[in-house]
Amino acid sequence: MAFMLPCYLGNGCIVDGATRDFLVIRKDDPNNPNVQFTPELLPNGNYALKSNSGQYLARCNGCSPTAAARGVTQDTVTVHVENPTSKLHAQWNIISIPPEY
């Protein structure tokens, strides 16, 4: 099982990144507070995902120069929004997918 957690620029995670905290996927302990995000229902029915830093997950276009240079993608996910209510790029539509048995 793998989890998403913030990768801090201070650790050299994303060189020359446009924001401080990018999300990366790695194996970790699910009880680690760094891999836990609190869903918050917004007035428009979308959700915001709050990190343990108090900021929210958001799409970020062109924020990783490394990804752009490799032609991977311009869109990354970062933790940088303070108030998701007015920021569409920090709002998520969560769809429940039942497990298959």
Image: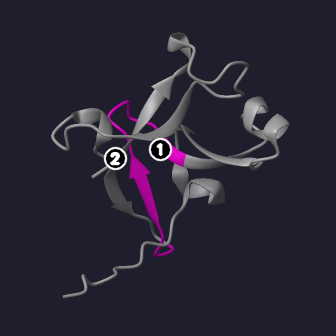
State the residue position of label 1.
56
**Residue 53, image x, y percentages:** 38, 30
Question: Residue at coordinates 23% horizontally, 35% vertically from top-left?
Answer: 33
**Residue 45, image x, y percentages:** 46, 76
Q: What's the magenta region?
A: 44-57
Instruction: Give whichever of 55, 67 is nearer the camera.
Output: 67
State the residue position of label 2.
3
* Corner quadrant of residue 6: top left
Instruction: Give whichever of 52, 61 is nearer the camera.
Output: 61
Question: Residue at coordinates 42% horizontally, 72% vertically from top-left?
Answer: 94
The quarter of the image holding the C terminus is bottom left
Q: In the rendered image of this protein, does residue 71 appear above or below residue 17?
A: below
**Residue 85, image x, y percentages:** 54, 56
Q: Secondary structure at mark 2?
A: strand
Residues at marks 2 and 1, CA–CA distance in whole angstroms: 17 Å
* Corner quadrant of residue 91: bottom right
Question: Residue at coordinates 57% horizontally, 14% vertically from top-left?
Answer: 12
Please tell me whether mark 2 or mark 1 is closer to you in this view: 2
Instruction: Give whichever of 67, 88 is nearer the camera.
Output: 67
Image side of residue 16 versus residue 53, left or right: right
Residue 54 is a magenta residue = yes
| Mark 1: amino acid | Tyr
Crowding at mark 2 (Cα within 10 Å: few <14, some 14-19, many 20+): some
